[in-house]
Image: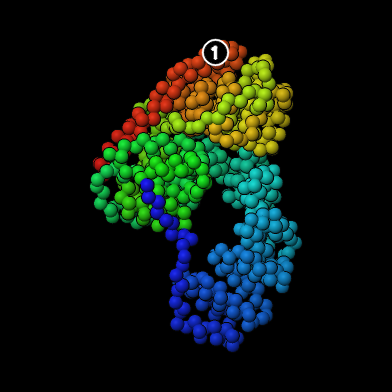
Amino acid sequence: MDIASPSMQTLSVPQALPPEWDGLMAAVRARSLSLPDVMSRANQLQADGQPDLAGQLYQAWLDHSDGPMRLVAMYNLGTVWSSLRRHEDAERVYREALALKPDFLQARVNLGHQLEHQGRKEEALQAWREVADSDTTAEVMGTSPQEMRLHALKNMARLLEQERRFPESEALMRRSLVLQPEQPDVLQHYVHIRQKQCAWPIYEPVGEVTPNQLLSNTSLLAMLSYSDDPALQLMVAQRFVAEKVTKYKGPPLHARVKREGKVRIGYLSGDLRMHAVGFLTSEIFELHDRSRFEVFAFCWSGNDGTPHQARIRAAMDHVIPLQGRSDEEAAQLIAAAGIDVLVDLQGLTNGARPDILVRRPAPVQVSYLGLPATSAIPGVDWIIADRYVMPPEYLPYCTERPIYLKHCYQSSDRKRPVGSTPTRAQVGLPEEGFVFCSFNNNHKYTQPMFEAWMRILAAVPGSVLWLLADNDKARENMLAHAARMGVSADRLYFAPRAAPPDYLARFQLADLVLDTFPFNAGTTANDCLWMGTPILTLSGRSYISRMAGSLLHAVGLPELAVTTLADYERMAVLIGSNPARARSYKRYLAEHGRSSPLFDMPGLVRDMEDQFEQLALARR
């Protein structure tokens, strides 16, 4: 394995000073150079790749000039230092500007950014809070105070969401939307943060925001959790691509490179680490036939220092880090490597880089695992699937063509470490009673499915529901909703997040996993079946709502994939009322599950390779 060094964070070679530099500095010292002239020269220096000299020029002008224009120079100097990641210097300059003009809102907003970059999050929030609460009415530097307040509110909400302080973040989003309803990015986060908190209905009116605005600004991830309508999912993906993805007009980059020898497969991802995608793909990389294929990772995952990431990297022939490289540079690297098949493991999920794909650095570009839905990204022509997750009626709503695997689309990892089995007491479960469970992320929980779970509990005396406790507000909302349906709090148990081996071991205490809908369990379904615990799923119209059903067909339990909510409830009650049936499923999985097609990783990799090779050689 070879690892290429990223271009960023290397030692820079000092650049020669411009010929006019000495004269320029002399003019500044003599106070004969106006600030507009300084700004013009500074802009040129930045364009020439010498932002440090631009900063020196502004600092020299400030050292030798005074008057009201100093505020503009300070503001510009702060932005230069910030672009160079000299955040302490930028903070100092912004504080100097605020000492001269405390209501300089632009400087206070930028001060907040510098504090955040230094890890001083509470100070950053306070800086933005002062802007949001300001009663300043005067416009400064062509920007209204209202724009600055909205900017501050947005940054506060973003940071609080990152810190998982969801109720505070949502309150700020609501405040922002009351001031200005037409904020697509805020609307997107508002809907999803309500999903994360199980705050139903997720489309709660706020200010003058219309129901159409809430729906049309729902993110793809949120829509996958909310609606099983494949047309809506396609619409959201296409809207994102139209608004956010580069309209690349140049020729395909792969056309510049001759391809010969072994077929070269490249995996493109920011999740080759301790992540669901990283867990599912590690054995694929290890099992590729090196006599036929050469395997590359093009990743921006960073280094998490875990044995799992080390295992992934060791399975690659080449690891090419993309951190610090532009999308154009990344695409050029992929093209220059002569990649035949580029497998995108990201889609439009968090951290995605679709602008790499639109440049077509490989002749065959395939979507897999990261986004179990259409991405609508130009240049991604194929998606790995099976005939269960992508039936014929789904194809009109998917921009990619399917590469059908023989059994199940989803890969597995037969080497995943498993912790020791805990007792019920160790995880806080009662000693008696049938245990239903759902360890999916809370944003996948929907009101209709949660209400179905409550009806199931009510129909199975003594049963309990074991759920993931993703955040306190979600737990509080679920308990309140259960109480409204007449289900007492002692029927719901909440599991904290755990290390992967311990999380896997917990499945053995559950009798039946209840899947979410329309966003089915993916990795979680794979995990529970590997651990020998059955899962009941509801299969719908979209790829994502048929994932667990595909796994169940491959493992030999198709009767646990139903197609109506009424059948889902009926089957759950039937199994919960007859624990011997659940034990029978567990016995079947213990005896046959791991030898089923679901976990036949060598067979899946050969199937995938045969199709990759056929596509690649046809384009050489």
Is 533 rendered above or below residue 581? below
Q: Position of residue 181 (x, y in %)?
A: 64, 50
Q: Which residue occupies the foreground of this view, 526 or 223? A: 526
Instruction: Say if residue 542 shows up in the picture.
Output: no
Left or right: 273 as drawn, with respect to 335:
right
Is 277 rendered above or below residue 558? below
Left or right: 6 as drawn, with respect to 166:
left
Q: Which residue occupies the foreground of this view, 168 or 492? A: 492
Instruction: Say if residue 338 shows up in the picture.
Output: yes
> Mark 1 highlights which residue?
581
Q: Residue at x 69, y 23 (%)?
A: 491
Q: Position of residue 14 (x, y in %)?
A: 46, 72
Left or right: 276 as drawn, with respect to 334:
right
Mark 1: few, some, or many residues within 10 Å (few <14, many ≥20)? some
Q: Residue at x 47, y 54 (%)?
A: 323
Displayed quadrant of residue 577? top right
Q: Position of residue 56 (x, y in %)?
A: 56, 75
Q: Residue at x 37, y 50 (%)?
A: 2
Amino acid at circle 1 = Arg
What kind of element bears circle 1? helix
Is 539 rendered above or below residue 559? below
Left or right: 47 as drawn, with respect to 253:
right
Q: Residue at x 42, y 27 (%)?
A: 599
